[in-house]
Each structure stands twice: as C-alpha cells, then as structure tokens.
C-alpha cells in the first residue's frame, strides 16, 4: 500500500485471494460497493493466535476497503459460554490493534431465528423429530449411501408447530426432541440431510436468562445473523466449506431481495508444538497443567501478551504466512523469528545474569565506582544511552568461566583475556571453590588502559561477556519458557494423550538472578533484551520489591526437541 503508483498488475499480485474477491465485487458494483465483515467468536474460551489470523482478515478487509467490521459473539450454547470470555475476547482484539464498529450477540437474534424457524415449519420445510440423537445419526447414511427418512419427517405442520412451542415452554426435556430442516436425505453433502436446527437446553443463558429453552444450532444461526446484520463477506476457515450449501439454502429461504451474504473460506493457522483449540486449551487450564489461560506458554493471545510477544510481531507473522485454500502446519520458529525481529528493533539492551557467580577484580581499588556508558539499542540511535555502575565485584554468568577449558573457549579461563561489555578488558587469574568443588568466586585483573575511549580499548580479544556490579544489582526471579509440547503435532501422536506430551522443561524457574539497577522501576509487560541471552519482559506477578522476568524468546533458535 505504501508503494508509489503501483501498476494494476503489481497491485494484483500483492493481493491475497480474499482481497481479489472483494476488489472484483467492488468492480462489479455488488452490494452497491458496500463491504461488511464480522468476527464471530464463540465466548467459550480465550482467543488463540489462530483467531488472530481471522481477526486480521475480518478487520483488515473492512479497514482496507472503507467498510465495516462488527464483533459478533456466537453465544448460541449457554452450556459452554461465560461473561469472562466475552471480556477477554474484547481485550485481546483491542490489544491486537483492531476496532469493531458494533458489538452484536447471536442471542440478539433469538426472536428472529425463532420466527424464521416457524416460517420453515409452516412451509413444510422443517419438522420436529422425536428420535434419539443416536437414531438420527444412524439414519444419516454415508457419503456414498443415501440416508433414511425419519418416521416423523412427514408429520403434519400443526403437529410440528405445537411440539416446537412445547420444546420452548419447558415441557420437553433435553434430548427428547429436535427441530430439523427438511432438505434432502439423499444429498451427496451430508450437511444437507435434514440437519438439526434447534435443540432443547434447560440451562440459563448468560444474556437471555431463562427466556428460551430451545437454542439454534451453529449452522442455523450463523448465516442468518450475517444476513440480519448486512454482512457482505463472511470469512471463515476451510472446515466450513462443506457447510456452505446449507448456509446458502437457509439464506435462500429467508431473503426477500437480491442481497446475499457470501461465505469465503481460508486456511486455518496451525502452529507446531502446541494445540489450537479452545476445548483442548480449556482442558490444560482445568487440569492445572498450565497456570491459566494467560500462562505464557499458551498459544492464547493473553498468554502471548504476558510472555512478551507484541501485537506487531503477531500481525507481521500472520502477514507472512498469508491466506490460501490449503491447510497445513505453520512452523512456530517463524513466529519466534517475527518476535525477535520486532523486539530487536525497539527494545533496550540490559544486563541480566541468570546463573550468577562472583567475579572479583583483584587489582581494582576497593570502594571505587565508575560509570560506564551503555548504548540502549544499537539498532535505534534515538533510544540514547545510559550510565551503568562498575565496581570491583561483578556478577557474571557461571558458564562464562571454566577452569579447564577446551581450546576454543574464549571466555574466562585462567590466563585468558575477555572484554567486559562496556567496561574493561580483564585477564582471568583463577577461582575459589567450596568443599564440593563448586566455583564460588572467580578472580581476574583489569587493564586500566582498556576502558572505552582509552588507547588500549580496541585491543583484540575474542570474547565479550556481560556483568552486573554486585553492590548495584537487584535480585530477580527469571522464568525460562520453552515450547509447551515435545512434539510438533501433539494431537497426531498415536496411542498418546496430548496432555502426556507436555515438555517438562517448558518452564524452568530461576531464583536469585541478578539484574542491573536500571530495571528497578520497570512496569509489567515492558520488554527488554538481556544481552547475550534473549528477550525478556516483566511478568504481571512482578513488584518493585520482587522482580519477575519472563523469557519471551532466546536470542537464537536453539530448539533441539523435547527433553534432553
Ligand atoms: P476452536 O476450535 O479453537 O474453539 P472455533 O473455530 O470453534 O475455534 P470460534 O470462536 O467459533 O472458534 O471462531 C471464531 C472465528 O475464528 C471463526 O471465524 C473461525 O473460523 C476463526 N478461527 C478459529 N480457529 C482458527 C484458526 N486456527 N485459524 C484461523 N481462523 C480460526
Ligand atoms: Mg466453535
């Protein structure tokens, strides 16, 4: 969109197939040039990144073509739906950076849907079936074998009407009767074989209370809601392709003008090493396998936000994978790459030591403190620099020292020189160990002529390590997150429950980490790069007295698969 004067051809090529359909419709003057979409979540769980893909196209199309996108809660099943989910869905859409024009609920249309069902009954296009769901399923036939008519299929209109009213008055118990559309029991499309359109549910609804005892099925509600609202482009995922003839059939019975909402399907987002279904994610929450819907390992938008993923990174990833007509798996490392790319450009580099051991510069004056300049972000000069305190005792990573190091080890080992980031070059002289042989202190001598700007500052040394001055450090808890599952597709494993495939190292908690003073006043969800380690953000559990950081993503992709 930012290209200058793209030729028509260039413009065409960069459009995805949905945009092409919309542009074609506009060219042909369909719906008087009106574009209206909707995002229709069922409030039965938190949104996951798959929903973000639908959100980006639903809201994106409306934005791009000056149209309208409404948020519509598909609240047709009171058994699974809750207000908590409604609230979280709105929060997540806004966080992603989208704005709806109106909020609607499928339950707003219960009366209209009821009236439409009555119309179908009157026209002999719907009937009440008193068989059990097992019996109805048995009569469905197979894709190659026609179904069998229900014995109630041709019952008188008045009888169906009376029973339909009884279904809604509470006289009929759940499962005792259903309303079915009378279409074609021999259709090659199984969805057209007299689909169930209403069932009895005696549970109160979170918006309509006990007013209704019958609830419309998804197929009966969705298209009609689109129609009532004036949706022009009803975008959904590929599994609904086979439902489209039914969607169109209902609209044909309902419409009294040329206007028709039209359904277009695109491929789902499926990510490796996770599961992408609210039902499955709910199981993880209910079984306590994660700490909640916003556990930073969850593929939910709430989890990703808490983990430090940015809306820009998620949108960039979705843009990269695009919209097609073919289902497949998307590699989570592509998402992680997008997260790194985004954070790299805009977050401050700071020092954090995850597994600290003390380094003592034995020739550095006791009590002396210097201030070293640290560039906040080499990718963005505008972010400036800050002063970091340096002293005789520094925290360094335990694995930046080795007593007996192999030849290619360029960090601290006796006799070797390394650069302390933004500080001096130091030469390692040895260490002190406890009775069990654990290193408790590392010793080195600094070269006073090697501070930045000094004559020897550019002397060539192979290794650079980060540090935090001991008297100027803060304690922190660091939560190291990794992929939630050990295998690419946890649902595809034979003889294994997906819940048994959780990566035991998906969360490793490290206490007693050391971070620089600069981080004293951080706010929840702020992002940083802990230099040399990865991107981290401030967890929502963090307080000024007890800092908690999450590893958003490591600096490099180091996934080796499962537990070691
Ligand atoms: P789940 O199985 O996770 O509950 P759903 O399809 O039942 O997903 P809805 O709340 O009914 O969830 O979906 C709202 C919209 O989001 C629908 O248009 C649906 O097609 C879309 N959607 C759901 N999952 C994905 C996905 N993985 N990729 C792209 N779009 C998705
Ligand atoms: Mg659903």
Image (cartoon, grey):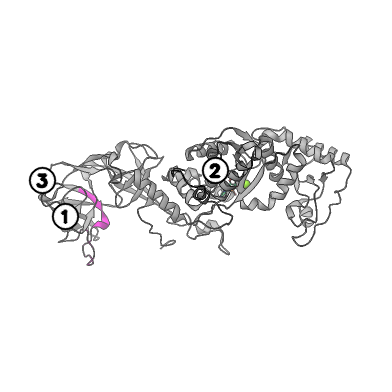
Determine whether 36 is above or below 344 in the image. above
Determine whether 188 is above or below 166 in the image. below
Determine whether 102 is above or below 24 in the image. above
Q: Which residue in the protein does label 1 denote? A: 443
Seen from the viewer's position, the closer of residues 407 and 556 is 556
Label 2 CB-ligand 1 distance < 8 A: yes
By secondary structure, the bulk of the magenta-drawn segment is best described as loop
Q: Secondary structure at mark 2?
A: helix
Residue 11 position within the rendered picture, expressed as x and y whole percent measured from the top left:
50, 47
Report the span colored magenta.
394-413
Q: CA distance from mark 1 to mark 3?
A: 14 Å
Q: CA distance from mark 3 to mark 2?
A: 60 Å
Residue 139 position within the rendered picture, expressed as x and y whole percent measured from the top left:
80, 56
Q: Is residue 412 magenta?
A: yes
Q: Is residue 144 magenta?
A: no
Determine whether 414 is above or below 201 in the image. below
Q: Residues within 10 Å of mark 2 (few under 14, many from 20)?
A: many
Q: Reading the chain from its start, which is encountered first: label 1 or label 3? A: 3
| Dot 2 and dot 1 residues touching (CB under 8 Å) | no
Seen from the viewer's position, the closer of residues 385 and 228 is 228
Q: Which residue in the protein does label 2 denote? A: 55
């Amino acid at each position: 969109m930012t290209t200058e004067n793209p030729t028509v051809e260039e413009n065409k090529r960069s459009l995805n197939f949905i945009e092409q359909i919309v542009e074609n419709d506009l060219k042909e003057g369909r719906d008087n040039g009106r574009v209206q979409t909707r995002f229709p979540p069922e409030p039965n769980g938190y949104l996951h990144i798959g929903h973000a893909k639908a959100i980006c196209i639903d809201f994106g199309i409306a934005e791009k073509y000056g149209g309208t996108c409404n948020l519509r809660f598909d609240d047709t099943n009171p058994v699974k739906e809750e207000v908590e989910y409604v609230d979280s869905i709105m929060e997540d859409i806004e966080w992603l950076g989208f704005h709806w024009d109106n909020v609607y609920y499928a339950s707003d249309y219960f009366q209209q849907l009821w009236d439409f069902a009555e119309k179908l009954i009157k026209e002999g296009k719907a009937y009440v079936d008193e068989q059990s769901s097992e019996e109805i399923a048995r009569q469905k036939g197979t894709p190659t074998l026609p179904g069998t008519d229900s014995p109630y299929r041709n019952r008188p209109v008045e009888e169906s009407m009376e029973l339909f009213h009884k279904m809604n008055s509470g006289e009929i118990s759940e499962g005792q009767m259903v309303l079915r559309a009378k279409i074609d029991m021999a259709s090659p499309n199984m969805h057209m074989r007299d689909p169930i359109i209403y069932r009895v549910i005696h549970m109160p609804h979170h918006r309509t209370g006990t007013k209704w005892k019958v609830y419309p099925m998804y197929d009966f509600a969705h298209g009609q809601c689109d129609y009532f609202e004036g949706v022009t482009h009803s975008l959904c995922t590929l599994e609904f392709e086979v439902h489209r003839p039914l969607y169109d059939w209902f609209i044909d019975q309902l419409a009294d003008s040329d206007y028709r909402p039209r359904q277009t399907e695109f491929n789902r987002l499926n990510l490796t090493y996770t599961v992408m279904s609210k039902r499955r994610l709910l199981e993880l929450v209910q079984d306590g396998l994660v700490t909640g819907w916003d556990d930073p390992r969850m593929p939910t938008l709430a989890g990703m936000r808490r983990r430090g993923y940015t809306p820009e990174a998620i949108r960039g990833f979705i843009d990269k994978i695009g919209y097609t007509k073919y289902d497949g798996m998307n590699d989570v490392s592509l998402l992680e790459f997008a997260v790194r790319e985004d954070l790299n450009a805009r977050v401050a580099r700071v020092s954090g030591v995850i597994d600290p051991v003390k380094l003592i510069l034995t020739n550095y004056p006791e009590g002396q403190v210097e201030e070293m300049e640290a560039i906040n972000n080499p990718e963005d000069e505008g972010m400036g620099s800050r002063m970091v305190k340096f002293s005789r005792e520094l925290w360094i990573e335990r694995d930046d020292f080795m007593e007996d190091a192999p030849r290619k080890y360029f960090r601290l080992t006796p006799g070797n020189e390394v650069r302390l980031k933004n500080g001096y070059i130091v030469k390692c002289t040895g260490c002190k160990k406890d009775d069990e042989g654990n290193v408790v202190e590392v010793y080195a001598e600094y070269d006073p002529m090697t501070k930045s700007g000094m004559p020897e500052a550019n002397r060539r040394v192979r290794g650079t390590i980060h540090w935090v001055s001991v008297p100027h450090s803060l304690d922190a808890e660091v939560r190291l997150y990794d992929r939630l599952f050990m295998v690419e597709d946890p649902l595809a494993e034979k003889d294994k429950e997906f819940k048994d495939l959780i990566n035991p190292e998906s969360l490793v908690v490290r206490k007693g980490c050391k971070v620089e003073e600069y981080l004293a006043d951080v706010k929840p969800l702020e992002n940083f790069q802990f230099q040399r380690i990865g991107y981290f953000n401030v967890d929502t559990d963090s307080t000024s007295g007890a800092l908690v950081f999450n590893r958003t993503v490591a600096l490099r992709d180091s996934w080796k698969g499962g537990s070691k």
